[in-house]
Amino acid sequence: MTKAERLMTVVSTKGQVILPKSIRQHRHWDPGTRLVVEETPEGVLLKAAPAFAPTQPDDVYGSLPYQGPPKTLEEMEASIAAEAKRRHARD
């Protein structure tokens, strides 16, 4: 689709709008894709909604408290490698 190409759609009695197939395909917006609708001075902007809400470290820090002595970096890396190996083995 070229930038100069103008596509048209109609608002239904239920307020629904069908996006042209070429736009949906270009954006990879499959059925069920959640869109963010934003009012702008130029019109309405549609963007794919993020899969997860943005978070900050403070939002999740301490959500899984650990009881016990601190782990070394080597112990943490060994645990991560063991879990990755376990998950890969079940594929």
Image (cartoon, helix red, strand yellow):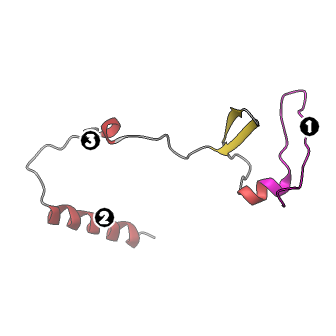
Instruction: Measuring from the top left, give residue 29's x and y in whole percent.
Output: 72, 52
Of marks 2 and 3, the one in the foreground: 3
The amino acid type, in three-letter code, at marker 2 is Glu
Q: The residue tagged with tag 3: helix, strand or loop?
A: loop
What is the crowding at mark 1: few (fewer than 14 residues within 10 Å), some, or many (at least 20)?
few
Instruction: Measuring from the top left, give residue 19's x and y in whole percent.
Output: 83, 46
| Vertical arrangement, residue 65 with respect to residue 13, above or below | below
The amino acid type, in three-letter code, at marker 1 is Val
- Which residue position holds label 3? 64
Q: The residue tagged with tag 2: helix, strand or loop?
A: helix
Identify the residue shown where x is 50% and y is 44%: 52
- Left/right placement of residue 32 relative to residue 4 reads left
- Which residue position holds label 1? 10
- Left/right placement of residue 15 relative to residue 77 reads right
What is the crowding at mark 3: few (fewer than 14 residues within 10 Å), some, or many (at least 20)?
few
Identify the residue shown where x is 76% and y is 36%: 42
Front-most of residues 40 and 50: 40
Magenta-colored span: 1-23
Of marks 2 and 1, the one in the foreground: 1
Quarter of the image for residue 79 reads bottom left
Indicate which disc residue 76 carries.
none
